Structures are given as structure tokens and as C-alpha cells.
Image (cartoon, rainbow, N blue to C red):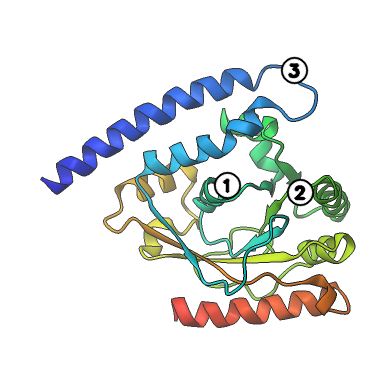
Amino acid sequence: MLPLLRLARKLIGWIDFLALTTLVYLLSWLPWRGTHPVARLFHAWCRAFVRALDVDLRLHQKNRRRLPEHFILIANHPAAFEDIGIPALFDVVSLAKAEVRDWFIAGRISRAAGTLYVDRDDPQSRDQAVEAMVSAVNAGRNICLYPEGGCKGRRLHGEFRSGAFEVSIRTGVPILPLFLHYEAQDDFEWQPPYHLPHKIWHMTTTRNNRANFYVYDPLDPKDYPDKYAMRAAAYEMYARWNAQYLE
């Protein structure tokens, strides 16, 4: 009976998601000044996508202090799921690789939602992305990015890039660290030779659909002399969580 219930839940989830996607996609063609209507619906669209994938998304509040209303969210990046999982839980504008802009349907929706883009291999593009993030944060938006610089697999990459920490130092807005752990790592990890359609199938058919997102106390930029010291402190924390949850 349980497999039948899960199948029914998935079917209902996909019907709901496809209907909302049709609406959001059509709205994305509307010219609009200021915040686009798609940006207001993006949180709901991401939550519908999570339900369609039938992922058991859990937010674990490890923070000891109340979370700030204005923040720069960073996370490790083992899978494609966090690109919808994080906006499903947090009001953020994400920084994505430039290729996402041209993805079928999702690319247009992400553009209308206000997503920021960067060509990770182009230093000029990275500099422009930092300026765009500073502008977004100074305008009152929360942003989300992955300091590993891309989807690096289930284990923490060997270093962090400094963009998120530069934005924090320049704006005075704290870094909110989120550590991601998928219990069925083989099904969620996004690495070659698989492409996004493969991973969507793997995620929606996994036997263990639990995704654990652990949020911790923010890092205040006033506590660090520069972006490099802040980056080092953040990486040390992530290395500790990597050992705690994944080793």
C-alpha cells in the first residue's frame, strides 16, 4: 500500500507542478518594471517542484541565535536539488552559472525571477557578478551562492572562492551558512556522466528521499579583518560539518 500511496502523491505533485509551471512560464513573457510577478511566485514554484520530485526536505535549525532577516546564504553544492530546495525554504535570489539562463523553460523562469548569473571561468564575469550581488544586497535582497564555485560532488571541495565574503564585507550583511546532506548520496550527487534529466529521474525514484538542510548561526563581517579571514573561518566550519555528517 505504501508504494501506491507514494505513486499517487507523485502523480498529484507532478500535475500541480506542471500546471503552475505553465502559468509561471506564460507570465515570464510579460514585460515588467521592477519586481516581476514571477519573482513573487518563484518560492511557490520551487516548493511545487520539491513536491513533484517527492523529496522529503527537512530544515534543521542548528542556530542558537535568531536568524537575521537580511543575509547572504552560502551552502555546499553536491546536487542539482538545492537550486530549488534552497529557494523553497528561504526568500533568496540565487547566483547561477551562465548556462542556466539558456535552459529550456527553467531558464526563462529563472531570468524573470531575478536570478543573477556568472561565467565561472571568466574573471571579468566573476567581478561583474560580485558587483551585481552587492547591488542586490544593498537593495534589500537576500542572495544565495555556492562558495565552492560549482557543483563539486558529495564531499567538500578543497577551497572556497571569496565572492560571497567580499559582498558581506562590503555591505555589512552577515553570511548565513547552510550545510546540505542527502542520505541517498548516489541518487542526488550531480557528477558526470549524468545530465539534469538523469538526476531528476534518480531523485524522484530514490528509495531514500530525505534531504537534510542544516542552518547555523550567521557570520558577522564585523568579526573579520577581511574577506580572506572570513572565507577561511567559513571553510573551517564546513570542513567540520563535512566530517560530522559525511565521514
Residue 138 percent coordinates (x, y): 85, 50
* Image point (67%, 41%), residue name: 99
Residue named by callout 3: 31
Q: Residue furthest left?
A: 1
Query: Hey, what amino acid is under mark 3?
Result: Pro
Of the numbered discs 1 and 3, the one sitting upstream in the chain is 3
Residue named by callout 2? 119
Badge 2 density bin: few <14, some 14–19, many ≥20, Cα 10 Å: some
Query: Residue 87 has which mark?
Result: 1
Are discs 1 and 2 less than 8 Å apart at CB?
A: no
Which quarter of the figure has residue 147? bottom right
The reply, left or right, for residue 91 in relation to residue 131 is left
| CA gap, disc 3 and disc 2 | 26 Å
Q: Earlier in the sequence, mark 1 or mark 2?
A: 1
Above-or-below relation of 236 to 216: below
Q: Quadrant of the C terminus?
A: bottom left
| Secondary structure category for the residue under label 2 | loop
Q: Which mark is residue 134?
A: none
Query: Would you say 99 lies left or right of 19 here?
Result: right
Q: Is 193 placed above or below 227 here?
A: above
Q: Position of residue 35 (x, y in %)?
A: 74, 30
Amino acid carrying mark 2 in the image: Asp
Q: Position of residue 177 (x, y in %)?
A: 63, 67
Give the image quarter of residue 26: top right
Classed neighbour count for the residue bearing mark 3: other residues with Cα under 10 Å, few (<14), some (14–19), many (≥20): few
Check the picture and name the quadrant holding the N terminus.
top left
How far is the residue under mark 1 from the one under mark 3?
23 Å
